[in-house]
Image: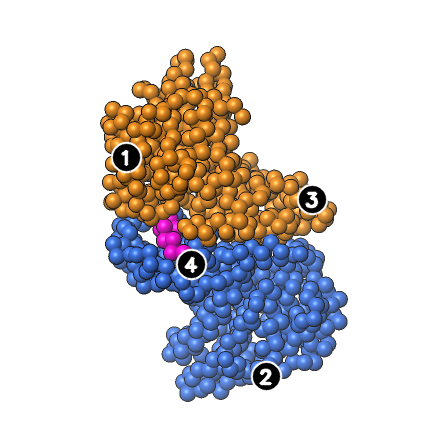
Chain colours: A orange, B blue
Amino acid sequence: MTIHPVKGIRLATVAAGVRYAGRDDMVVIECQAGTSCAAVFTRNRFSAAPVQVARQHLQQTAPRALLINSGNANAGTGEQGTLDAVQCCQLLANNLGCNVTEVLPYSTGVIGQYLPVPAFEQAMPACVNKLREDSDAWDRAAKAIMTTDTVSKLFSRKTIINGFEVTLTGMSKGAGMIRPDMATMLAFVATDAVIEQPVLQKLLNESTALSFNRITVDGDTSTNDACTLLASGAAEMSPIAVGSNEYDQFFTALTCLMQDLAQAIIRDAEGATKFITINVSGAATEDDCSAVAYTVAESPLVKTALYASDPNWGRILAAVGRAPVSEMNINQVSIWLNDVAIVTAGKPDQGYTEEAGQKAVAGADISIDIRLGDSTKSVTVWTSDLSHEYIRINAEYRT
Amino acid sequence: MTIHPVKGIRLATVAAGVRYAGRDDMVVIECQAGTSCAAVFTRNRFSAAPVQVARQHLQQTAPRALLINSGNANAGTGEQGTLDAVQCCQLLANNLGCNVTEVLPYSTGVIGQYLPVPAFEQAMPACVNKLREDSDAWDRAAKAIMTTDTVSKLFSRKTIINGFEVTLTGMSKGAGMIRPDMATMLAFVATDAVIEQPVLQKLLNESTALSFNRITVDGDTSTNDACTLLASGAAEMSPIAVGSNEYDQFFTALTCLMQDLAQAIIRDAEGATKFITINVSGAATEDDCSAVAYTVAESPLVKTALYASDPNWGRILAAVGRAPVSEMNINQVSIWLNDVAIVTAGKPDQGYTEEAGQKAVAGADISIDIRLGDSTKSVTVWTSDLSHEYIRINAEYRT
């Protein structure tokens, strides 16, 4: 995939020694003056220190730089954690010649350990010296933010809006503790489009709802989820206004990119061998569709059956049946595994054969379609299977 | 443990060949005329055929016999499943000389396969001939209802009520697809106490709320959950009335037995290496305590950490923080791992050491105490860890 640099956005990475030896683990993203910034954060009540500091800084001013580290989440670290996050921001601000509130901190990694601030201090000047706008810098940054990820997640696209070419490039990380709640794991998206902050925030909220808020690995919402969208305004165009055709065009391009980034997290989910798309439609509300989709997506029994390529549809049925929705007429429920009907109008499909079921779940991409009734409401959620490797990774995570 | 027979209750088992070779897989429990029966069933909307038939039969008359099979759940089997369940009841009724509605069916095992009715037909006469009241019959029955269970769950106690000796004996089965929702996995409890049906049902409801409704292995509510309480009335005593001291005494004895049976399911949970007690207190409502307790109990990350004997308390903190409760003041949250304080008033406890944490989770019995505020509300939930063995069992279940 070709990665397009984003005018006005420069990146740099360095091996600061936060936790990992011999690899980059610190990233600085600098944006030109006038860049708009939108962000969404975790709704976990125990949000990490960097999330709290980033929220506060965003309330005061638009950022000039983002400071990201992997290997240490600076979560569950109390007041010391907040002081550490602010101090790291100050170190970067000193090197860039900006105000501390113009730096947003992001951390990902182990929870409950203090940030090694001296490591940041030592690495900062070299990192700032390496700031570049080119695609290699994006590539290195996407790798440096990885923790249990096995591949970096970096996507890029160009779109023509009203005759002007606009670039969107973004990266994400995450493989476990994944069920973003109105936010995401760490993701950073940048564009050169001209978009003022309130419009950019609206675009990000709507796009997040259809991408990062539609994935789950294990149902565990992280303390550090954050997704940030920068618009440098370097493209030659008029500002994008809410309700315009330009808005719709940009929204589509942004949502495609965000879905690429979100789905890449599921494809790289801890121990995943399957990529599972669950579409639920026809319930009275979108919330009910979502509740059923997540109940199936997070059922350990559904996930282990799919890991075994076993079309054990009884487990899907049982998960649908226990989903926390106020109303469900089981005589209207139909379920397909890929295109194989397994349940029709609440009863085992007459034409179903075990052979067809096995074929449906043999591959690495599996879709489960669940129709609950006649409404036009619909929600799609992406998830992974539950494997031995997931247990190994998470049993050994801190050792 | 000494198993006390229950006067008026006879049991028999037989190897009917429902699914397993060379082991008993069918149980008949016969109760004397005048026995009261109370039952609670799964709230999974896709309840299995035997659950639907048992509910219908209970509405018409008190049962004279229960018919139980393991290896096949007769769930997701549509109308044929209902016909099959009724036909098996009829077979037993013919052999006992009672009405078909006086037989309650119970099935547990694989979902989505039809019941082999001819196997029931062939095995029924021999089974009925073997009906006995002795403790060996209870022991064989507890073994015959097992599926992925590795040990049978059979408990017994005597209690003196108003000068009269009363016996309570019960068995349960279950190791996976365990999160009973206002019901249980299969459990059968019998007593010789004299208790009329409405009182017995009230006792069972209240006792279930404190036992089977307080356990979870994987959050997956089964389609076949059922708990049945028989009171033969063979003891020399007056009927137990609601609100009496006798009611309270019986309730205590019953709840102890039910908790023994429920906790035995967790100790034998699929792949379990740890028995985890989670107590949550101090929230505004009991529902909020419960929501937090289940969020922690079903977090794959908490469960894998405990499997690894890793005091990764950040994962507990993250689970508490994402629990679906309307209000939580994180400054009032304190958490203990066994007796080691890990979080105090929302902050990492100053006295916590990794060494103390490791010691706390080294054993097989771990308690997590979470205090959310000042109220006197409190809920205790029991769960297991998530291990390689859980994945193996559930990936290979149908092979």
Circle 1/circle 2 CB separation < 8 Å = no
Residue type highlighted by circle 2: Asp
Residue that mark 3 sits on:
A359
Q: Residue A363 location, x and y as percent?
A: 64, 41
Q: Give the left or right position of residue A125, taking residue B39 as reference.
A: left
Residue that mark 2 sits on:
B134
| Residue occupying the point 28% across, 43% down | A81
Badge 1: chain ID = A
Distance between mark 3 and mark 1 Cα atoms: 56 Å
* Residue B309: image tag: 4
- Span colored in magenta: B310-321
Q: Compared to A151, does B38 lie above or below?
A: below
Examine the residues drawn in magenta and state their main secondary structure.
helix
Badge 2: chain ID = B
Distance between mark 4 and mark 1 Cα atoms: 35 Å
Assign a secondary structure to mark 1: helix
Which marked residue is nearer to the observer: mark 4 or mark 1? 1
* Residue A121: image tag: 1
**Residue B7 figure quarter:** bottom right
**For this rendering, which residue is in front, B366 or B200?**
B366
Residue type highlighted by circle 1: Glu
Distance between mark 3 and mark 2 Cα atoms: 50 Å
